[in-house]
Image (cartoon, rainbow, N blue to C red):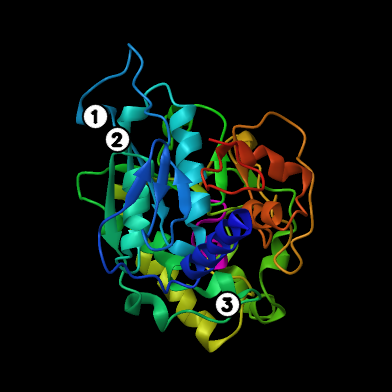
Amino acid sequence: MAFWTSHLLGLLFFFLLIINQISFITTTTTTRVGVILKPTYLHVSVFREAPAFRNGRDCGSSAADRIHVAMTLDANYLRGTMAAVLSILQHSTCPEDVMFHFLCVRHEPVVFSSIKSTFPYLNFKLYKFDVHRVRGLISKSIRQALDQPLNYARIYLPDLIPIDVKRVIYLDSDIVIVDDIVKLWQVDLGDKVLAAPEYCQANFTTYFTDTFWDDSELAKTFHGRKPCYFNTGVMIVDVDKWRCGNYTQKVEDWMVIQKQKRIYHLGSLPPFLLTLAGDITPVDHRWNQHGLGGDNIEGKCRSLHPGPISLLHWSGKGKPWLRLDSRKPCTVDHLWAPYDLYRSSRHSFDE
C-alpha cells in the first residue's frame, strides 16, 4: 500500500510540474542524503543530487577561461535540462569553468530550487525572456510545442546575456553530451557569426512552401550561397558579430513575412535558415546526432547515424524521459537514461 501511495504521489507531482501550476507556499524543503523532497506536503523525492565535479590540474581560473552555455529553462523540459547539465559536467575536464545561462519566461520557484539543490556548485544565471517581444510574430506550426514563445528565445539570446560575453554555445534541453564541451567551444568561427553541423544531403527545399519558391523575389534569397540545413539546437554564436550585424532583426523580418504569406511549416528553425543557411561555419556532425526523437508528427524510433558521436539530440516529437516512463522506449533512449536524475521507480538506480 505504501508503495502505491508513493508512486501515485510521484505521478501527481510530475503532472503538476508539467502544467506549470505548482506554487510554493513555503520555502521549506525536507531532504535526505542525495535526495531532494519537494514540496514537504507531498513527501515525494523529485531529483537526486548530482556529484560535485571539480576542475583538473590544467584548468584556468580567470574569466577568459569561462565556457558559456545557454539553454532555455521551464518545467516542461526540466528533466531534460537536468540530464543535459549533468552530461556536460561529467565529461568536462574543467567543469567549474562552465557558466550556464538559463532563459525562462517566468520565475518558477520549483524550477529554480530544483537546479540549486540538484547542482549546489553550479555556476549559472537566470534571465527572464519577455514573451511579448515575440508573441505577435509566432505563426502556427505543425507541432504545438514548436509554437511556445520560449522556443524563440534563442533569437534574442545576445540581447539577454551580459555584454562581456563574446561567445556562447546554445543547446536544446533534449541533448546529452558524451565528450568534453571545450572541443565544441574551441571551434574556429572565422569571419562567421554562427557555427553548427550542416547537413547538405538533406532536401533543403522541403523546409519551405510552394508559396516561397513560386515567389521570384523570395526565391532569390539564397542566390550567391549554397544553403544547407542546420539544426538550431546546437550552435556556437559570436555574440558581438550577432549584435553588430543586427541578426535578431533579420530573423524577425522573416517572421513578419511568414505572418503575411505562409512560407514555411516549422517553428523557429526556418527563419534561421533563411537568414544564415550557406553562411555559417560547419561543425563536425559528431556534435549533433539529431533526430533521435523521430519526426514532428509521430515521433517514431530512429537509429543512430553511423560515425563517432559527441552529442546526442532527441529533436523531434519523442522525448526519452516520456518514452522510458511509458515503458515503450526506443533503443537510443537507453543512452539518455544514465543521466536521468529524476527519482523514478521505473528506471533510475535505487538510493
Q: Please, is residue 177 above or below residue 180 in the view? A: below
Which mark lies nearer to you, 2 or 3? 2
Which amino acid, by three-letter code, is at mark 3? Glu
Query: What's the distance in space between the residues labelled 1 and 3, CA to CA?
Result: 45 Å
Query: What's the distance in space between the residues labelled 1 and 2, CA to CA?
Result: 20 Å
- Say few, some or many: other residues with alpha carbon within 10 Å of mark 1 (under 14 / 14 to 19 / 20 or more): few
Can residue 163 be spotted in the picture?
yes
Q: Secondary structure at mark 3?
A: helix
- The residue indicated by pointer 2 is 121
- The residue indicated by pointer 3 is 217
Q: Earlier in the sequence, mark 1 or mark 2?
A: 1
Asked whether, in this view, residue 47 is left or right of residue 221, the answer is left
Q: Is residue 251 magenta?
A: no
Q: Please, is residue 60 above or below residue 260 in the view? A: above
Q: Which residues are magenta?
A: 269-279
Q: Is residue 270 magenta?
A: yes
- The residue indicated by pointer 1 is 64
- SS assignment for the magenta stretch, majority: helix
Q: Earlier in the sequence, mark 2 or mark 3?
A: 2
Asked whether, in this view, residue 31 is left or right of residue 337, the answer is left
Residue at horizontal 75%, vertical 54%?
327
Residue at horizontal 51%, vertical 52%?
79
Asked whether, in this view, residue 333 is left or right of residue 282, the answer is right
Can residue 315 be spotted in the picture?
no
Residue 244's image quarter? bottom left
Q: Position of residue 307 (x, y in %)?
A: 73, 30
| Nearest the eye: 325 or 261 | 325
Q: Secondary structure at mark 1?
A: helix
